[in-house]
Image: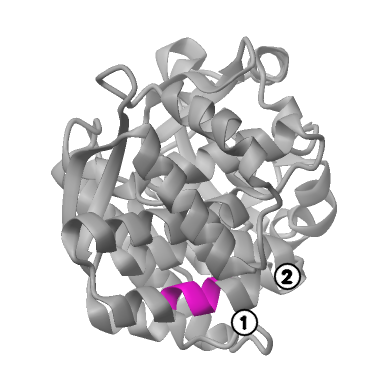
């Protein structure tokens, strides 16, 4: 799989001009959603090299990450003159870069794409690593392709208009990258003040965080082995996310992952001797910033059922996990029984209050 060039922008206009003119394109299309159309598109539409670019705007959020929206994008590309030599610039969060990336990968068997993620979650996770796709038949990211963008442009200026909850949601993936990389990076992340954001420092941390993901994806682009490290916190996290959605109180992805990391770090401590002091420090950071996901011990069965349905499991009754024995020491393909899962949920309930 090709890898994309990730550019931490010093000046968006220059960096984007370079990305757009890197290879020759006959026409540029810009995919936005109803939010980025209002708040981010005005920043780039005034750049002279985009004066003839055609905007395609889609509905906001995950409910629109479907076949109908994808068909709409294909239709717009087709009727507005896109050829195999056209370029699609995806300007938005993970939903836009996932769907736009898949539209680009499939239109006329593939046109070039550039990602400009505008949310923290999009910057450190969705826009990097080549996973693209849509939800289908009620299943998240069921249809898709590995198709990296040509370039990914990171401009933390977009984060200044992002609400605090969405900033925290993306930060959970950064915390995960800290836990699976090295002690210096992890310790900077748990020491970061989320109440008064220092954007220059955040931009540096974002660059390091993306580099962690890129290093892992380069070793295993198709998730046969070490890329599973990126699922740390997600086995329990996805169960929390689905449970909250089912209960009618949806929570942001990163909040679910943060809660999932509390459980999976505790299990890492039990099974792999992950150090207690680092468990405590990470849990304290998550408790102070993310609060508690709502569930009671009566919901354990339902949460466990969600984990059992995870497509990553191999044996019936056992749930697959990635664990760590120290910051950066990764153990993929670990399993937990129902009792182990209930222990993790007990720990979460007792610790998070
Ligand atoms: N979001 C995890 C991955 O890209 O593999």
Q: Are marks 1 and 2 in contact (CB under 8 Å)?
A: yes
Sequence order check: which comes first, mark 1 or mark 2? Answer: 2
Q: Is residue 316 visible?
A: yes
Rendered location of residue 154, percent (x, y): 50, 63
Q: Mark 1 falls on what kind of element?
A: loop
Q: Is residue 120 visible?
A: no
| In this rendering, position of residue 179 left or right of residue 233 | left
Segment tinted magenta in the rendering: 282-286
Q: Quadrant of residue 149?
A: top left
As drawn, 17 above or below 322: below
Which residue: 62% across, 82% down? 194
Rendered location of residue 257, percent (x, y): 51, 52
| In this rendering, position of residue 82 left or right of residue 107 | right
As drawn, 141 above or below 336: above
Q: Main secondary structure of the magenta part?
A: helix
Q: Is residue 32 magenta?
A: no
> What label sits on residue 194 in the rendered view?
1
As drawn, 169 above or below 235: below
Assess disc 1: are there few (<14), some (14-19) or many (≥20) residues with their C-alpha within 10 Å of its C-alpha: some
Tell me how far mark 1 sits from mark 2, CA to CA: 9 Å
Location of mark 2 (residue): 164
The quadrant of the rendering that contains the N terminus is top left
């Amino acid at each position: 799989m090709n890898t994309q060039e990730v550019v931490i922008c010093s000046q968006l206009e220059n960096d984007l001009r370079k990305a757009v003119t890197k290879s020759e394109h006959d026409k540029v299309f810009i995919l936005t959603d109803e939010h980025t159309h209002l708040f981010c598109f005005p920043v780039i539409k005034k750049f002279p090299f985009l004066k003839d670019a055609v905007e395609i705007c889609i509905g906001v959020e995950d409910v629109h990450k479907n076949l109908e929206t994808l068909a709409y994008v294909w239709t717009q590309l087709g009727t507005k003159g896109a050829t195999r030599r056209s370029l699609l610039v995806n300007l938005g969060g993970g939903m836009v870069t996932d769907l736009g990336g898949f539209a680009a990968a499939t239109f006329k068997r593939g046109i070039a794409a550039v990602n400009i993620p505008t949310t923290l979650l999009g910057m450190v996770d969705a826009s990097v690593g080549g996973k693209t796709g849509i939800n289908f038949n009620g299943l998240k990211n069921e249809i898709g392709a590995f198709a990296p963008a040509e370039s990914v442009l990171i401009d933390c200026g977009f984060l200044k208009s992002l609400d605090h909850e969405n900033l925290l949601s993306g930060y959970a993936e950064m915390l995960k990258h800290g836990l699976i990389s090295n002690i210096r990076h992890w310790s900077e992340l748990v020491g970061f003040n989320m109440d008064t954001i220092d954007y220059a420092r955040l931009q540096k941390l974002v660059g390091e965080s993306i580099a962690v993901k890129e290093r892992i994806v380069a070793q295993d682009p198709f998730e046969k082995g070490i890329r599973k490290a990126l699922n740390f916190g997600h086995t329990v996290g996805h169960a929390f996310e689905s449970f909250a959605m089912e209960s009618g109180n949806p929570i942001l992805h990163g909040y679910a992952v943060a809660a999932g990391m509390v459980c999976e770090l505790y299990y890492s401590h039990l099974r792999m001797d992950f150090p207690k002091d680092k468990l405590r420090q990470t849990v304290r950071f998550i408790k102070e910033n993310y609060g508690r996901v709502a569930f009671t011990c009566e919901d354990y069965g339902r949460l466990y059922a969600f984990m059992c349905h995870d497509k990553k499991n191999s044996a019936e009754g056992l749930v697959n996990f990635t664990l760590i024995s120290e910051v950066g020491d990764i153990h993929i393909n670990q399993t937990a029984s129902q009792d182990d899962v209930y222990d993790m949920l007990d720990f979460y309930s007792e610790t998070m209050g």
